[in-house]
Amino acid sequence: MSNQVNPYSEEGSKKEQVETMFDKIAPYYDFLNHLLTLNIDVLWRKRTIRSIADIAPKKILDIATGTGDLAIMAAKKLHPDEVVGLDLSAQMLAIGQEKINKKKLQNLITLTQGDSEKLPFKDNTFDAITVGFGVRNFEHLEVGLKEIYRVLKPGGKLAILEFSMPTAFPFKQGYHFYFKNILPLIGRITSKDPRAYTYLYESVQAFPDGEEFTGILEGINFKSSQCKPLTLGICSLYTATK
């Protein structure tokens, strides 16, 4: 089980704090994502989309969609009938909608503000569900995962992209130094939020990655759960089926 880490204060709702944080950094989010990962995040998203391509999903849900990058990529590469992107942050969704409109995908992708722990969809609705860098931000991890299981169709596939902790020396040590010291400094200067990228480091530290997370998925009745480390373990791609 993950330890609770909140963006701003140990007291109060993590959900509300996460929403506030992403509303604040929304204008800088895409720029910082590409800068701080040296654009490798694009390759990680491509791997995520490829991981669900084998079932040719027609209806896809992207949870914690943010500014919609993963939803847009799914729409363009998988040619589904419908993609729904859900996120807590209205400001992130507003930027995502601008991108979708610019790419003329508004008839294919629908963005909605909502809570991952109370998904506004019927049981067995989606063929595939993706989550890009979002499960760390769930206030109650297992509640959110159970909701994902509920709205996924039998035989449907889940793909979760999330930061993780590399283990190989000396990459592990360099990664810790960059993630703990350099990344928050750049994020603080650029996004004007002194806590957002410190929270990123702390939440990755607290997240139950690797086999611990696949064990949680299996405990919720997901099947064939797998963890594939990406880029020497900086990031991990988790897949499972219902």
Image: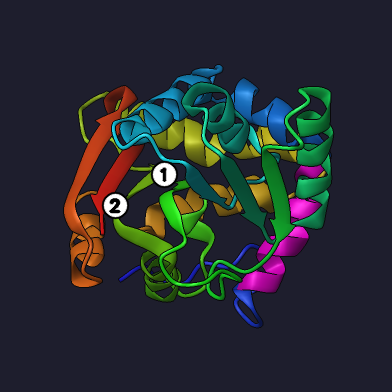
| Discs 1, 2 touching: Cβ within 8 Å | yes
If the image is split into quadrants, where does the N terminus sit?
bottom left
| Residue 231 belongs to magenta span | no
Residue 229 in the figure: left or right of residue 191: left
- Secondary structure found at label 1: strand
Residue 83 visible in the displayed image: yes
Query: Residues under labels 1 and 2: Cα distance?
Result: 8 Å
Residue 123 in the figure: left or right of residue 11: left
What colour scheme has been applied to the protein in the rendered image? Answer: rainbow
Residue 175 in the figure: left or right of residue 29: left
| Above-or-below relation of 154 to 12 | above
Q: Label 2 sits on what residue type?
A: Asp
Q: Name the residue under label 2.
A: 209
On the image, the x and y values in percent for residue 220 come to 25, 71
Q: Give the range drawn in magenta.
A: 15-26
Q: Name the residue under label 1.
A: 162
